[in-house]
Every structure is written in C-alpha cells, then in structure tokens.
Amino acid sequence: METLKLIYLAAGPGIALAVYIYYSDKWTPEPKTMVIKAFLFGGLACFPTNYAEGVFEKILSLESIFNGRASPIWWELIDYAFIGVALIEEVCKFLFIKGFIYDDREFSEPFDGIIYGGVVGCGFATVENLLYVLQQGQATGVFRLFTAVPSHVFEGVLLGYFMGRAKFSFEPEKELWKGFILVVVLHGAYDTAALSRAEWSLFVIFGMVFLAIYLGLRAKKDLEKHSAVIEFSPAQFLLVKKGIKKGPLQLKDIRCLLSEDKLSPEDLLIAKKGGKIKPIKEVFSPKIIAQYRSLTKIPTQGQSRNFFFILYGLTFGLYFYFWFLRNYRKFRNHKGIKINPELQTLQLFVYTIMPYFIYGVLLRKSNGFHFEPFVKVSLDWIVAGIQSSFLYFQLRVIKRFLKRRIGGTFNVISIVFQFFALSGLIKMLPSNMSYFLFYAISLTFFQGWILTSVQNDLNIYWQRERRRLAETK
C-alpha cells in the first residue's frame, strides 16, 4: 500500500501537467498517439542520462562528494551541475525531440513545439521522480512536486518553443541554440543550488523554478496567439506546386495539408492580396502574431465531461487547480471580465498549501503537540473550506454568464456544499487504514462527478457562443 501511494505521488504531477499541456492546444489538438509517444520518449531519455551522469562522476572522481561524504570545491560543484547534470539531461531531451518528433508531419505549426517539448519534459520528470521517490520516500516526493517536476516540464516547454520557431524559420540553428542554451542555464543554476546544500539554496531553487514557469507561460502565450492567427486569419493564398496554382487556401487549410504530408514548409505560396510569393515557413513565421489584435475572439470548445471525470480522479483532484485556471481564462479572454486568472489560481494554491506547511513547522518546533489530532482535523476542514470558497466565487461568475445563454443551470450552493463535505472527508482519512487508497480515490472520483454538472453546462454554453458568433458573420 505504501508503495502504491509513493507511485501515485511520484507519477501524478507529471501526468497532470502533461494533460494540462495537451489541452493548451485550443484549436487543433495533436494526435493522442503522438502525445503519448512524446511522453514515453521523455521517460526513456532518463536512462541514458543516468548512465552518462554516472560516467561523468567517475571521470572527475566526484562520487564521495555528491554522496554527502565531502564538501565540494566550488568549481567542481559548478562543473557537475552544469555539465554533469544539466547539459547531459538537456542534450538527451533535445535529441529525442529532434530525432523522433521534430520532422514528423504532425509538427505542423510552431505551437506544436510547446505541446511536444512540454510533454517530453513531463515524461522525463515522471520517470526521474519515480526513481527518486521510490528510493527516498514521501518527503522527497512532496519537495519535488514543487521543484524538480515543474522545472523539468517548463524547461521542456521553453525548449519546444524555440524548436517550434526553428521549424518555421530561415535560421533554425540560431533558434535551436537559443533555446538549448537557455534551458541549460536554468537547469544548471537550479542544480548548483540543489547540490550546494547551503542555507541560501532553497531561495535559488524556488527562484529558478518560478523563472522557468514564468518564461514557459510567456512562451506558451506567445505561440497561442500565433496559433489563433493561423486558425482565424482571413488571408488567402494560392499554392504554387510544379508550376500549377491551387487554391485559394487559408492558413488553417495549409496547416492541415502540412499535417497530412501533402505540403512541406519550403513550398511556395502566392498571397491573393498583393501577389507576393513566400514559402510556407515565412508565412508561418512568428511575424504573423502582429495580426492577432485584429482577429475576432472565438470562444474555445468545451471539454468532455467523461474525460474531465476520469482526469480529475486519476490526478487525485489536482486537476481542480488547472480547471479553475482554465475557466477563469476563458471568461476573461472572451467576456472581458477584470480578473487575473493566474493570480487567482496561485492564491488558491498558496492558501491550501501554506496551512499544512505552517502546521508542520510548529509541530517540529514544539516536539509534538498535545492537541495534534484535534488541530489536524480542524486544519483539514479549514483547507476544505478555503477550496470551497474559491469554488463558490468561480461558480457565481460562471453562472452569471450561463444564465444569458441557457435556462436552468447547476445549483451553486448544492455543489459547493457537496464538494466541501467530500474534500474534508478525503483529507480526514487516516493513511494507515485498510484500503486507504481505494477509499481516497473513490471519494475523489465522486467529487469529480459532482463537478461534471458544471462542465456539462459550460460545454453547452461555449457551443452556443460559437454558433451565435458564426451566425452573426
């Protein structure tokens, strides 16, 4: 039972982030087989890196130093962090993406780099996490949940960002080098701090993690705009192939032909307006983002309630944070509500994690606490209350918009109360009880099932919004 819990703790975050990244592709989701392939390749990249890191340790005779039996000299620390870990790991990830994914026909626009690079990072983080957590235990799993896992994932997103730009650039080597150097620097700085074991190291570790997340989200947002231009640009082109003109084609048609292997980025297009001849890679270059402001904002599609239900349960409720962020982003982008989705989600995350952190610190300092069971139970219900409060205000926002397009919708109070009760019960389950994992997962699935009624109404709403917009054109 303990091993199952550790596997869940180690694998859950990487899988949850992989799903989040996959659903970031709003318009043309990548084939699931390709995404699974990318995840598996990321996991496989762990094994050559482990071997290469071991060889590097032996060459420099660093085994005793990094086993904690000696204090490393500063240059040894930096060499090992940047060359023995960061460079080796990023080279392996880069080669797996470049060798098995980069030239695939499904890599048909720059944003696809975000998906495949990020998912490769998720696969690498998951396998590496399993190797560490199964050996070192729960505390290591919790620490890596907030540090190593997001670091690997968003470094993968950054690497994919530059690979996506490179595929549709006249200077691909320049873009590839920029991305590769950036992720090695971020990774190396993180590992230098982690291996130093200095008092200041935690600040640098979390600083590098937040920097990787920030840059990764910036890169993702940049290419999301690029993807939207390809999807909704009214510009038309004629295809010139073997001296014959075909068309007219819109950018989304060209992307589709690329994914079907009927076109390549080097094929020529003639702009119907102006008659300028350009290769596809120039038409799809990052410069087209300039058109983004003139586009009509099209509502995104909903999400299958069955898939939401399964995803919520398999991530042990962790998907709640992504769902929260996703809903607020959609209503901000398409309805102009004045809210910062990222800040709201960060607040939710901090408010539900910090009470446990403070409780742990107080418990250690007091060498045990006489009222520990009572305090722990109270804390669990307080955190459940915080989650439910955030959910209540989000559901109020959602319901306000839904009432304008559909009639009867979900009952906010009923859903929040049920969510609160189940959240508290899940947290109260003693981890040493028989069949703990079965009961915890069952209650989590039931909690997800309650939220599917909201997701169902959201799906109806976005479907009607898209239909309404299409009719007004």
Image (cartoon, grey):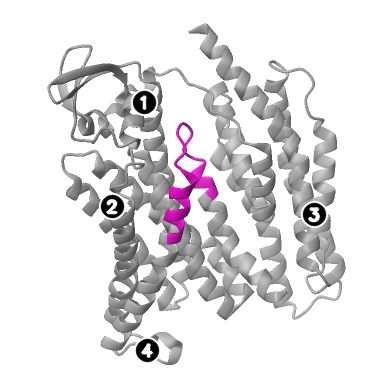
Between discs 1 and 2, the one toward the N terminus: 2
- 284 relative to 352 in the view: left or right: left
Q: Which residue is mark 1?
A: 252
Marks 3/4: CA–CA distance? 46 Å
Q: Which residues are magenta?
A: 19-40
Q: Which residue is mark 2?
A: 179
Q: Quadrant of the N terminus?
A: bottom right
Q: Are marks 4 and 1 in contact (CB under 8 Å)?
A: no
Q: Are marks 3 and 1 in contact (CB under 8 Å)?
A: no
Viewer-nearest of discs 2 and 3 = 3
Between discs 4 and 2, the one toward the N terminus: 4
Look at the numbered disc 2 and give the secondary structure of its residue: helix
Residue at position x 44%, y 41% in the image:
30
Viewer-nearest of discs 3 and 4 = 3
Look at the numbered disc 4 and give the secondary structure of its residue: helix
294 in magenta: no
Density class for disc 2 (Cα within 10 Å; few <14, some 14-19, many ≥20) is many
Between discs 2 and 3, the one toward the N terminus: 2
The x, y position of residue 112, in whole percent, is 38, 42
